[in-house]
Image (cartoon, rainbow, N blue to C red):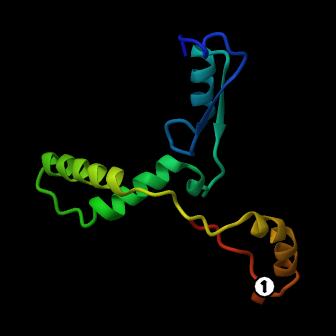
Amino acid sequence: MSQEPYASAKRVFWIVDKGSSHRSKAATARLTTAFPNAVLVHTPVRASRLNQVEVHFSVAQRKALSPDDFTDLGQVGNRLRAFEDRFNATARPFQWKFTASDLDDLPARLDRHAAGHPEESPPRLAA
């Protein structure tokens, strides 16, 4: 925040999830006291799919850290480094199933669902 372009910016938005270290009013106050031009923005509750860092860590958890049968932290580090190397060599963009057309249809589908037609349930947002 002390370097450009942040130091002279009118506002700098910090987007964070609902983690305990930054969800309280005290956390917001600490940030704005230290950096008056910082604005803390929280992602919606239960919206981790919007946070690409959380998506990546979820993949790492499933692919590299489960089962968690490590005898020491060195093994964890080695497994994560091996996962990172493989992931970087083979990674491709996520194929999102929720399309722009689904978004256009969502209000009508929600109305039908609210009217008691569960066979027309709202789409699940999935990666």
Within 10 Å of disc 1 (Cα), the crowding (few <14, some 14-19, many 20+) is some
Q: Quadrant of the C terminus?
A: bottom right
| Residue corresponding to mark 1 | 120
Q: Residue at x 17, y 49 (%)?
A: 78
Quadrant for the N terminus in the image: top right
**Residue at x 51%, y 44% (from the top left corner):** 19
Indicate the quadrant where residue 90 lies. Answer: bottom left
Residue 115 image position (x, y, % from top left): 88, 82
From the top left corner, tell me how far across and down residue 43 is, in percent.
64, 46
Residue 66: where, in percent of width, then height? 28, 65
User: Is 4 positioned to the left or the right of 116 in the image?
Assistant: left
| Pick the front one: 21 or 91 | 91
* SS of the residue under disc 1: helix
* Residue visible at 28% across and 55% down in the picture: 86
Q: How many labels were placed on the picture? A: 1
Name the quadrant containing residue 124.
bottom right
Residue 95: % across, % down: 56, 64
**In the figure, 5 relative to 108: above or below?**
above
Closer to us: 56 or 87: 87
Q: Quadrant of residue 10?
A: top right
Nearest to the observer: residue 36 or residue 94: 94
Q: Is residue 29 left or right of residue 118?
A: left
Residue pictured at 41% horizontal, 52% vertical:
57
Identity, as a three-letter code, of the amino acid under mark 1: Glu
